[in-house]
Amino acid sequence: MKIILLILATFIWGAGFVGTRWTLVDFGPVWSNGLRFVFASLIGLLITFGFSLIKKVNLRTLFYSREALYCGGVLWIALQLQTIGIGLTSLSKSGFLTTFYALFTPLFCFILFGSRFKKAFWLLLLVSFVGVAMLCELDIKKINNGDLFILASAVFFSLHIILVDRYCQNVDAFIFNIQQIHFIAIISIPFGLYYEGMPALEKLITENAYIFGSSLWGFIILALFSSILAFSIQVYAQKGIAPHIVGLVFLMESVFSTFFGYLLFDERLTPLMIAGCILILVAIAMVPFQLKVNRKVATY
């Protein structure tokens, strides 16, 4: 069941590709990321305030925890490194190199915790990577600075998966996620001002802003679904599932983003890309049958 929830999260992130495209019409990539979490934080404030009235709990516990701060900080670094890297390298290479978090996650689990993994896991990971390479129609010419930024972001994405696994086992998934969203929103504002200057916020209140497909709608979609819902699902679903399995399942995001790009933006979908999607789908479908996904088993 939790594997299905993780796939649902990747579906939402893949669909969030549409919202990101809309926000990039009026804003640079740094503010596209930053304002997404500012919107999510404001919505989260309303939800958590209502939650505090119903349950009569300490507001401080709803807005801050040291563990969520760690996770939020690592996730923010990953997103910003990825954003910078995308601007310096090709989309195909950035899409492929980002998925290296699926490789870094088990490596970090081995280095930090001495974890061991079944041969079936490495086989499914290899099949998935071949599928991603085909999906991206990878054409490697030379490594540039953008590629290094993307690889660095993959390191932090994998660390985020591991930190969530470490800290999420006994927390409320929704509150934990809102806490990390608040932190990301706070640190995104000064970084955005430094890197891209003052955002053109007036574009969010024009008459055209209320038309579906505008940057405002993009931020609402990213805030509600990609940030609040999908990350909350991740935190909840990671309870009981080992990090290396989570990283493998998250490769489904590339399939969904390709599908929505083809469906809504008329992007190319070649036979090679379709074959890559099929490989990834087959590999992920085999996870429940070939691997024990419980984090307490010896194969973790």
Image (cartoon, grey):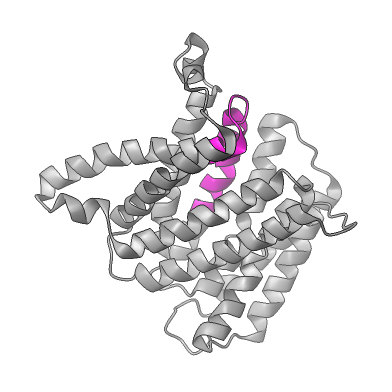
| Magenta-span inclusion, residue 254 | no
Q: In this view, does 201 lie above or below 92?
A: above
Is residue 106 toward the left or the right of residue 170 in the image? Answer: right
Q: Residue 123 location in percent, x, y?
A: 71, 77
- Front residue (pair 2, 212): 212
Location of the N terminus by quadrant is: bottom left
Farthest residue, direction right: 141
Q: Is residue 114 above or below residue 22?
A: below
Quadrant of the rendered image containing residue 98? bottom right
| Magenta-span inclusion, residue 29 | yes
Q: Residue 151 location in percent, x, y?
A: 68, 62
Q: Main secondary structure of the magenta part?
A: helix
Q: Is residue 80 above or below residue 199?
A: below
Q: Give the range drawn in magenta.
A: 9-33
Q: Residue 8 location in percent, x, y?
A: 50, 52
Q: Residue 272 location in percent, x, y?
A: 85, 52
Total numbered circles: 0
Residue at x 58% of width, y 39% of height: 195
Q: Is residue 135 above or below residue 201?
A: below
Farthest residue, direction top: 207
Residue at x 51% of width, y 80% of height: 292
Residue 286 visible to an observer of this rendering: no
Quadrant of the rendered image containing residue 234? bottom left
Residue at x 71% of width, y 52% of height: 95
Farthest residue, direction front: 194
Is residue 62 toward the left or the right of residue 33 in the image? Answer: left
Is residue 153 toward the left or the right of residue 296 in the image? Answer: right
Is residue 232 toward the left or the right of residue 212 in the image? Answer: left
Residue 208 visible to an observer of this rendering: yes
Quadrant of the rendered image containing residue 251? bottom right
Residue at x 64% of width, y 78% of height: 121
- Front residue (pair 276, 36): 36
